[in-house]
Image: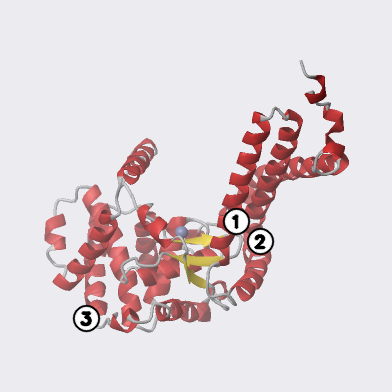
Amino acid sequence: MKPELESNPKDYPENTKIKPLFKRKLFSKISIGTVFSLLFINQVLFLIQPFSSDFIFSSYTQGYFRLTTLIERIVFSIFTFSIGDLLYIFLFLVIILHFFKIIIKLFRRDFSIVKFIIVDFLAILALVWLLLGTQWNWNYMQPTIAEKLHLNTEKYDIEELAAFTKDLIIKTSITQENSNFSVFYNNSSSILDISPLGYKEMAKKDDFFVYNYPSIKYSIFSDLLKYVGVSGYYNPFTAEAQITLGIPIKQMPFVINHEIAHQLGIASEAEANFIGYIASINNPLSTIQYSGHLNLLMYCLSDLRKNKYENYKEITSTIPKAVKNDINEIVNFWESYRNDYRRYSDKGYDMFLKSNQQKDGLNSYNKVVSLAIFYYRTN
Ligand SMILES: [Zn+2]
């Protein structure tokens, strides 16, 4: 027994470098309060969502979200590199630091300090969650794009999907013949400037698509993203559109326009794909239009195949060789990055899809296909 080494927890505030106790208590109360009020607000918003989605769209998506992300884009577009990625690195280091602090203090049996470090850590998580909630999550509660564009969402059968795909093959072929990607080969930033031009066309008909002060950047984590199968992402903390550098160039304009859709407040992935497609085909350049058609065609072919369409081979035989080569290039690219982790996550996703499968009608594996069919039906 060595009494001089026994510590009295009450002595900690004086003996160590930790912040005064009352500040700690205030800190923990604020973080706990933040978490519970956000949980409460989210719960209320979800409950009233069927009645409030229009209000959320006009006040949040087109109001608060639109304004704050515009300011973020103006500020962060000054930097050519991704500020959001640096923020993630910083956040990662903070988590690691707190983790090691806890381990060391546990090792030294300083249990009362561990409590404080955990409170600090939870406060940081609460702040991150607060930002995520207010800067992104409520976009999920706006009306669907089908409701907003008054699309005819009646069910379709496999023959309608096949007819749609045949038509799409023609559009893909025409734009492919007039495309020229070589202009982008030596200048990887020009594709970031040219791809969004379709939004200017769309904004003439609908204010929602006004996209000023672009903030589109290649991600610092591009190498890592390719291995997890991610072609781009939206950073809700800095409103930057992040593109994975080195993905097939014929996929890139479609991906850029997908991420811009997120910047405008489109939360759902299928809807961002759909808006990404529409923005690509509204671009004045055939090259960008081709990227849109080609990517949608790949989704349609995958839907036909998964639904075991009997004339699948007949349809694919009408695809020109140049288009087939581009499809193969994209498929082979992502296949080359496939690894054991991806195989497991795909299997999990497959099981998830099966558990949620609709019993009747056609299985739409790619919701973007349904939205595109509804769109062409209506327009
Ligand atoms: Zn997305």
Question: Among all residues in the image, which is located at the extreme top?
Answer: 1
Task: Find residue 3 and report its horizontal and vertical position in percent.
Answer: 81, 20
Q: Quadrant of residue 186?
A: bottom left
Question: SS of the residue at dot 1?
Answer: helix
| Amino acid at pointer 2 | Tyr
Nearer to the camera, 69 or 312: 69
Quadrant of the rendering where the C terminus is positioned = bottom left
Task: Find residue 228 and report its horizontal and vertical position in percent.
Answer: 38, 52
Q: Which residue is mark 3?
A: 177
Q: Which residue is mark 1?
A: 90
Nearer to the camera, 119 or 240: 119
Task: Give the mark toward the camera: 3 or 1.
Answer: 1
Task: Give the mark toward the camera: 2 or 1.
Answer: 1
Residue at 65% across, 40% down? 101
Quadrant of the rendering where the N terminus is positioned = top right
Residue at 31% across, 47% down? 363
Q: Is residue 164 left or right of residue 378?
A: left
Callout 3: few (<14), some (14-19), or many (20+) C-alpha neighbours within 10 Å?
Answer: some
| Amino acid at pointer 1 | Phe
Q: Which residue is mark 2?
A: 60
| Amino acid at pointer 3 | Glu
Q: Which mark is residue 184?
A: none
The reply to whether the residue tagged 3 has its Cβ within 8 angstroms of ligand 1 is no
Callout 2: few (<14), some (14-19), or many (20+) C-alpha neighbours within 10 Å?
Answer: many
Callout 1: few (<14), some (14-19), or many (20+) C-alpha neighbours within 10 Å?
Answer: few
Question: SS of the residue at dot 3?
Answer: helix
Is residue 160 in view from this perspective?
no
